[in-house]
Every structure is written in C-alpha cells, then in structure tokens.
Amino acid sequence: MENKLPDVKVKINEKKEYYYPVFIGENLIQNAQEYINQYTKAQKLLVVTNKTIMSLYPQTLKLKNAEFIILEDGEQYKNFDTYKQIMEKALELKLERQDALIAFGGGVIGDVTGFCAATYLRGIDFIQIPTTLLAQVDSSVGGKVAINTSYGKNLVGAFYQPKLVLSDTNTLKTLDKRQYKTGLAEVVKYAFIEKTAKCNFNFFEFMEHNTDKIKAKDPQTLKEMIKICCEIKAKVVNEDEQEKGLRTILNFGHTFAHAIEKATNFTHFTHGEAVAIGMRLAFDLAKSRNAISNTYYSQAISLLTKYGLTYVIPQNITKEELISAMYFDKKVQCSKVRFVLPKDFCEVELTSDIEAKNSLG
Ligand code: NAD
Ligand code: GLY
C-alpha cells in the first residue's frame, strides 16, 4: 500500500507538529496491517472486540502477531472487570510500550480499551477501529477514555489520544436503524455547534440537503459527513484537550441527556436518543429566554425531525427526578448545573445562570 494521506489530522494543544491521522472510507479494515505498520512500531497487537462484531466480521481484520479478547456485548461490560481482564491479558502477552492495543468496535470497546492503553505500563500505543457511526464521528477521536462505576458513567478515565483511527464506512452497513440514528444525533449536534468551533463547513445546510443520501448510507456522502464531524471535533480538541473551556460545547444537549439516561436507569434510551431529546430541550430553553430567533428554532427542530430524532420522555419520569439527576453531570461546578445552549445560528454558549429547576419549561 502506498502511503495515503490522512482524511483528518488531529493535533493536540502545544504539540503542534505532532498529529494523529484519521482515515475514513471503504475497505480500510482489510488493509489495517499496512496502516499500523506506517503509524506505529508495534510488534505485538492485542485486539479488543465483542461477540457481535466478531460474528459479523470474523475474518476481516487480518493482522500479524495479534491476539484477540472477545467481550460480551453491552455497556455493562465497560467496567472494572473488563479492565482487569484486558490488563491481565496484556501482562500475560508481555506487551511492551511500543506494542499496541486495538479497539475494534463501538464506543464501549473504544472507551475501555483506551483506558487500558492509557494505564498499561503508564501508556502503550492505542489504535481505534470504530465500527458504529457514533464511534466514527465522536468517541474514537479526541482521547476521552473511561470505564463506568456503580457511582456513574465514565467516572474513571483519562485523556489519552490514539495513534491512529481507521473508520471503515463499510462497517456501518450492518448497523441497525436504531444504532445508526443514535450516531446521527451526534452528527446533527456538530451542525448546531459548528460556528462556535470556528469551523465553516456549512454543515447545517449539508445535513439539510443530504437527508436521503445519508439515510441510504451512500458511501461518498457518509465519508464526507464523517470527515466534517471529525474536522470539527479535531478543531475543538486541539484548542482544549482537557475540557477546561471550549470542549464543553461538544456536550451540547448532554446535560439533559445524562439526566434522562440516569432517570430512566440507562435502559430506555440509547445515548444518542437521549442527546436528541436533550438538544430539543436546549432549543426550547433558549427560545423561552429569547436567546434565538423563531426562524432558527424552527429550522433546528425541522432538522431533528428530518432524521427522525424525535423521542418522548416516558410519562412516569417526573420533572423532579430529571432535575435531581442533572446534578450528576460532570459540568456541575460549585453545585451549579451548567447548560450549553444555542445562542445563534450554529452557535452555542456555556451558561450557569439558569437554575436547574427552571430549565424544563
Ligand atoms: P456500542 O459500542 O455499545 O455499540 C452499539 C451496538 O452496536 C452494540 O451492540 C455493538 O455490538 C453493535 N455494533 C458495533 N459495531 C457494529 C457494526 N458494525 N454492525 C452491527 N452492530 C455493531 O455503542 P456506541 O453507541 O458505539 O458507543 C456508546 C459508548 O460510547 C458509551 O459507553 C458512551 O459513554 C461512549 N462515548 C464515548 C465518547 C468519548 O468521547 N470517548 C463519546 C460519546 C460516547
Ligand atoms: N464526546 C464529547 C467529547 O469528546 O468531549
């Protein structure tokens, strides 16, 4: 394979000359070994994946000197037990620092594998091969890695960047409709924050005009869409890797979403579905404060509707439950809930001047 140029280069803060590549397109998995040889010095590889992915892609990821850990499928396995299992396997294989852990799967696999990579020998190379839309546009880029605890989601983790991201759009063909739409919620989120990220891809219009192709998973359109999302995320992460300021915009809709997920015991909605409701609530709140025009409000709701991102909070969940769940958000500061709200077309801002109890209309 001749050296290909990355689709996106992710740079982090001061280390301006260093970047890691994101490759996006069809049939990348089949050539994974060449990409790994080009971007790492790994001799041994430990691939972490799950049963669902292995049953769909049993022979696709052909690698030299690779061992596989095949986990059960599910968010509940993003935990300490899985962390221990992966670490013990890495120790048994005597992986050295220049070897690599590979996450082959969705956000669950990416997060737990990344956290193992961050802590094994205080840091071993890490490669993301994301297979869900959510992972390709969000979790595989930017270096947030974590496991869940009984106290809450993603509470033990690190910022640890991968060496290489290979987003093979062919894998999205086997994603079911629900998981695909879950990813689309995070995609639409980028349209709502683009200008605050100081990007100018006209992504809102792109999403408005390409609905049919995106729904049909047209490969070229998917590649373009994922590339823009990764560009926007890379721009934000370059400026603020550790979420001290700008990166909070990537949490647009998430204060409400996390509360909805918690109040429904993490069983009713996927993360993306909760984010879709959260974005809708953020638009409602901004409109009620006259922070955005009626025109933008209607355009935004219409975009969510075009992608079927309209969900309803179950009636048995009370306002009080949602408000109390909001205080578990990681953006809470000095016991105040902070919201990322729309302030203009494709612009958002972080605000802490709203009482949580007044945020739900
Ligand atoms: P997931 O990893 O659970 O994958 C969703 C489902 O799709 C699973 O059943 C999985 O086995 C299946 N699957 C994966 N690839 C498939 C394919 N190609 N074809 C068919 N089925 C496939 O969920 P997700 O939505 O990818 O990720 C959610 C996780 O990501 C959560 O744990 C969340 O906290 C985390 N997350 C992390 C970040 C970050 O920045 N690190 C950002 C957003 C979300
Ligand atoms: N998914 C939000 C972030 O990476 O910051």
Image: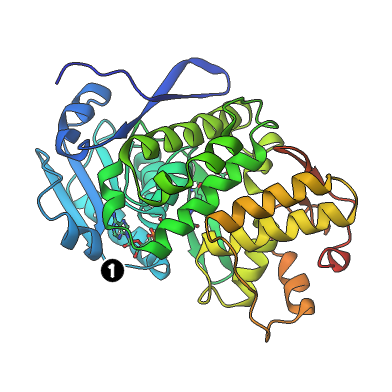
Q: Is residue 166 above or below residue 358?
A: above
Residue 298: x percent and y percent?
A: 73, 51
Q: Position of residue 165 (x, y in %)?
A: 34, 35
Residue 104 image point, x, y percent:
28, 49
From the image, which quarter does the C terminus lie in?
A: bottom right
The amino acid type of the residue labelled 1 equals Glu
Quadrant showing the N terminus: top left
Picture residue at 26% right of the left edge, 55% below the top: 49
Work out whether residue 78 can be spotted.
no
User: Which residue is label 1 attached to?
Assistant: 72
- Can you give x and y, in whole percent of width and height, for residue 321 in the image? 74, 78
Locate ligand 1 by image quadrant: bottom left
- Relative to 6, 148 lies left or right: right
Would you say 246 lies left or right of 125 here? right
| Residue at image coords 36%, 43% | 117
**Horizontal arrangement in the rendering, residue 217 relative to residue 35 (left or right):** right
Of 111 and 220, which appears nearest the observer?
220
203 up-or-down from 261: above or below: above
